[in-house]
Image: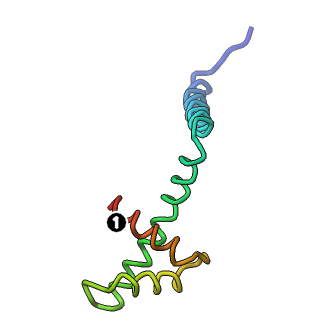
Amino acid sequence: MLFIVEDQIKPVPNLIKYFYVQAAKALEMMRMTPSDEQELLVLSQLPDTARIVRTLFIDSQKGVLPWDTVVEKVTFSSKHTRSKGKFTYLLALALCHF
């Protein structure tokens, strides 16, 4: 006969909950279309781009900057090499979501 101490039972629900969450994430990833995956990738890049734009406005001490200037400086300031068209798309998407 196996005796289970009550303290050994408590961690089990947390482990079960963890597995449920992981299974839900895996199911969500399986249901994603390629366009959803692309959108998720682009949205994950927004915080870095928004941080660069915020720093740009704070450093220039201006409330308004020309669009071309912002795109050019963000292109040079980014860690990742992307085209100006990609940054224009990211900045436009940031404006839509914020």
Residue at (40%, 84%) from the top-left corner? Answer: 68
| Farthest-out residue, top | 1
Identify the secondary structure beneath mark 1. helix
> Residue 79 location, x and y as percent?
58, 78
Total marks shown come to 1
Q: Quadrant of residue 14?
A: top right
> Residue 69 location, x and y as percent?
40, 87
* Front residue (pair 25, 9): 25
Relative vertical location of residue 55 with respect to residue 90 in this rendering, above or below: below
Residue at (52%, 71%) from the top-left corner? Answer: 86
Q: How is colour applied across the structure in the image? A: rainbow
Relative vertical location of residue 10 with respect to residue 26 in this rendering, above or below: above
Residue type, mark 1 in image: Leu
Residue at (56%, 36%) from the top-left corner? Answer: 28
* Front residue (pair 54, 22): 54
Q: Quadrant of residue 23?
A: top right
| Farthest-out residue, bottom | 60
Image quarter (top left, top right, bottom left or bottom right) of the C terminus: bottom left
> Residue 8 location, x and y as percent?
62, 26
Relative vertical location of residue 73 with respect to residue 46 in this rendering, above or below: below
Image quarter (top left, top right, bottom left or bottom right) of the N terminus: top right
Residue at (49%, 73%) from the top-left corner? Answer: 87
| Farthest-out residue, right | 1
* Front residue (pair 97, 33): 33
